[in-house]
Image (spheres, grey):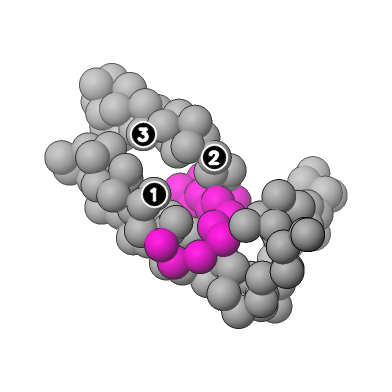
């Protein structure tokens, strides 16, 4: 029997925003390692220092947050928010004319496999 689709108010998105120093070569390398670790953990870039990943529930978000705590560079500042899928889909992406010409809009949706968790 297929599982019932979860409510868009229970499923959500883990939004990670960060400031990392990049003045020295070592700092840039550390920042790159942090961003690559996010990508390896299923995140994707929304903006240069804003990454997101779909999560079926808050418990899964907390699991990934624990991983992040181990990855944050000593001089880094990381903020994590959890947005429900309903909140995420109501978000806006507003770009200037030049930006929009060079960056076609990308609608990021909840992955299909999340619907079955």
Q: Quadrant of residue 78?
A: bottom left
Q: Residues within 10 Å of mark 2 (few under 14, many from 20)?
A: few
Q: Quadrant of residue 86?
A: bottom right
Q: Which mark is residue 34?
A: 3
Q: Earlier in the sequence, mark 2 or mark 1?
A: 2
| Residue 7 image point, x, y percent | 66, 76
Q: In the structure shown, which secondary structural element does the residue marked by tag 3 occupy?
A: helix
| Residue 71 image point, x, y percent | 28, 37
Could you tell me which quadrant the C terminus lies in?
bottom right
Q: Residues within 10 Å of mark 1 (few under 14, many from 20)?
A: some
CA–CA distance between discs 3 and 2? 13 Å
Q: Are marks 3 and 2 in contact (CB under 8 Å)?
A: no
Q: Is residue 51 left or right of residue 32?
A: right
Q: Is residue 62 left or right of residue 115?
A: left
Which is closer to the viewer, label 3 or label 2? 2
Q: Which residue is mark 2?
A: 42
Q: Are marks 1 and 3 in contact (CB under 8 Å)?
A: no
| Residue 25 image point, x, y percent | 28, 20
Q: Is residue 10 magenta?
A: no
**Residue 80 visible to an observer of this rendering:** yes
Q: Residues within 10 Å of mark 3 (few under 14, many from 20)?
A: some
Q: Is residue 28 above or below residue 44?
A: above
**Residue 111 visible to an observer of this rendering:** no
Q: Earlier in the sequence, mark 3 or mark 2?
A: 3
Q: In the structure shown, which secondary structural element does the residue marked by tag 1 occupy?
A: helix
Q: Which residues are magenta?
A: 46-59
Q: Are marks 2 and 1 in contact (CB under 8 Å)?
A: yes
Q: Earlier in the sequence, mark 1 or mark 3?
A: 3
Q: Which mark is residue 64?
A: 1
């Amino acid at each position: 029997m297929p599982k019932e689709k979860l409510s868009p108010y229970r499923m959500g998105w883990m939004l990670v925003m960060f400031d990392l120093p990049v003045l020295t070569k070592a700092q840039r390398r550390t920042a790159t390692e942090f961003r690559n670790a996010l990508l390896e953990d299923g995140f994707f870039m929304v903006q240069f220092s804003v990454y997101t990943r779909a999560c079926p529930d808050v418990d899964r978000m907390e699991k990934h947050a624990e991983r992040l705590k181990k990855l944050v560079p000593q001089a880094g500042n990381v903020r994590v928010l959890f947005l429900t899928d309903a909140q995420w889909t109501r978000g806006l992406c507003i770009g200037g004319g030049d930006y929009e010409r060079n960056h076609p809009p990308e609608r990021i949706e909840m992955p299909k496999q999340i619907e079955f968790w």
